[in-house]
Image (tube, rainbow, N blue to C red):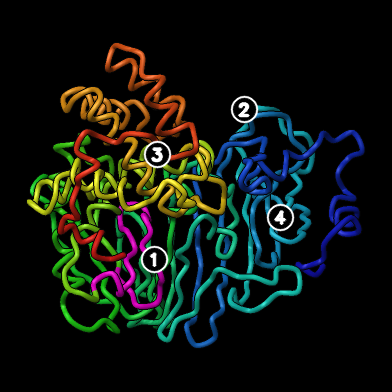
Amino acid sequence: MRAMLSGLVVAALVFAAVPAHAGEPGPSGLGDPYYPGAGNGGYDVKHYDVHLEYDPATDVVSGYTTVLLTTTRELSGVYFDFALPVRWTKVDGREGGFAQHHKELLVGTGGDVPAGTNVFVTVGYSVSPSDTHADVPVTMWKRTPDGALAIAAPSMSPWWYPSNDHPSDKATYDVAITVPAGVEAISNGELLGTYPQNDGRVTWGWYSGTPQTTYATFLAIGQFDLRRSTTADGKPVLNAYSTALSGTAAQQSVERTPEVVRFLEGKFGAYPMADLGGLVTPYTSSSLETQTRPSYPAWVFRNGPNTYVVAHEMAHQWFGNSVSMSRWSDIWLSEGFATYAEWLWSEANGEGTARELANWTYNYYAADHEVWDVAVADPTPQYQYGAAVHERGALALQALRTEVGDAVFFRTLRTWAERKARGNGTSAEFAALAEEVAGRDLDTLFRTWVFSAGKPVVMTAAAATAEPVSFRQIHRR
């Protein structure tokens, strides 16, 4: 049966063997207001085991992914977010029926599965992800001159492995990628090893033992210079630099990652991951907090070393990766916190205090600028990656710091990072925690800076006369 058949006809064909009394499949979307079709209901993913082969010459990905999930309700089938044509599926080792339509894959379980049951679902596929498929006209997979990249947000996984593609469902990962000898295959977490195959190819094995969101899971295949070291407390560091890079600014910046992490630990508490590092390539357009090993585009180092971007992306390991948003409207809990980490790094390096940067930023945006048109806690999909989240989120944190003082402020950040580690949080939960730590009501502050649109009337007493400072972020405007 052809893998790309879709719609009601396919459902009737592939589920003909399912008894008429079977229960319903889980929902094909979680109903996130920003991306209602993202994710799937009825189960919780525990682990992804991705086994793929890739040939840069043909851009063909072949292999399978096994998803270990636990049902949260009785199910007769499970949905995954997956855009590539499927060849076969198995449930607990038995062949099963499936149906695909656009980016949704429905796998039948062969009967009703009670809530609380562990289920292994395996999906096999072989395709060039960068091809335009009739059913899915857009692809996020990026073929490069020497390989391919699967690095993007808010959604990337459907173009290389089936998943529950929403930050509310995090899981651990094993990723094994077989490529021709002499080609590197980089992903998150610990490099377990490289394993030569009988046909001259090499398998790269990676393991991520800290639960991770789908959008923070990445794959980079090509020609990379790998540099490995160990932090003072024994954590492995692996940095990967595309051989297409010119100059040394990227290396001079990313090699300082352990130093940046030590600084951030002093503000946020112990580093929440087992590994760290970075990946730099000229073939991406923006930085991304891919877990343990952020991805940096070459252009962020075009004017020389830039440790601010390193501070930003490594701060995400606490805020965004360890503590992830519960829904996409909460993205300021990731991006606003990471931007504030840049301000803290600037403060520590004598290039403008967080207060000075906040005052300058407050003055930079006039009251009628669109950046104030939405609430920080609900920026809408249009502004979720813009200044309305990044800089206004940082402004909200500076307002909190000014209100409660340094001791309470940093205790709040550390408590948030510790209590919510490996999980998810909401804006309302952060506001409640801030009030708990401060021991007083902060409703007016959070209503003004986080939950309402519009430019607050006053930033600080010094805001009206604030002068631009020398922070690199301001120079990038």
**Disc 2 from disc 1: Cα separation:** 40 Å
Q: Which residue is mark 3?
A: 333
Q: Quadrant of the N terminus?
A: bottom right
Decide: is 335 above or below 50.
above
Res 434 → quadrant: top left
> Nearer the viewer's eye, disc 2 or disc 1?
1
Of callouts 2 and 4, the N-terminal one: 4
**Disc 1 from disc 4: Cα separation:** 27 Å
**Disc 1 from disc 3: Cα separation:** 19 Å
Instruction: Give the secondary structure at mark 4.
Output: strand
> Nearer the viewer's eye, disc 2 or disc 4?
4
Q: Which residue is mark 1?
A: 286
Q: Residues within 10 Å of mark 1 (few under 14, many from 20)?
A: some
**Disc 2 from disc 4: Cα separation:** 23 Å
Q: Which residue is mark 4?
A: 104
Q: Which residues are magenta?
A: 280-301
Callout 1 amino acid:
Ser
Question: Residue drawn at (19%, 47%), measured in percent from left and top?
Answer: 466
Res 264 → quadrant: top left
Q: Residues within 10 Å of mark 2 (few under 14, many from 20)?
A: some
Of callouts 4 and 3, the N-terminal one: 4
Whether residue 286 is in magenta: the answer is yes
Callout 3 amino acid:
Leu
Q: Position of residue 136 (x, y in %)?
A: 70, 68
Of callouts 2 and 1, the N-terminal one: 2
Q: Position of residue 228 (x, y in %)?
A: 18, 64
Instruction: Give the secondary structure at mark 3.
Output: helix
Q: As rendered, which of 364 and 137 lies closer to the eye?
A: 364
**Disc 4 from disc 3: Cα separation:** 29 Å
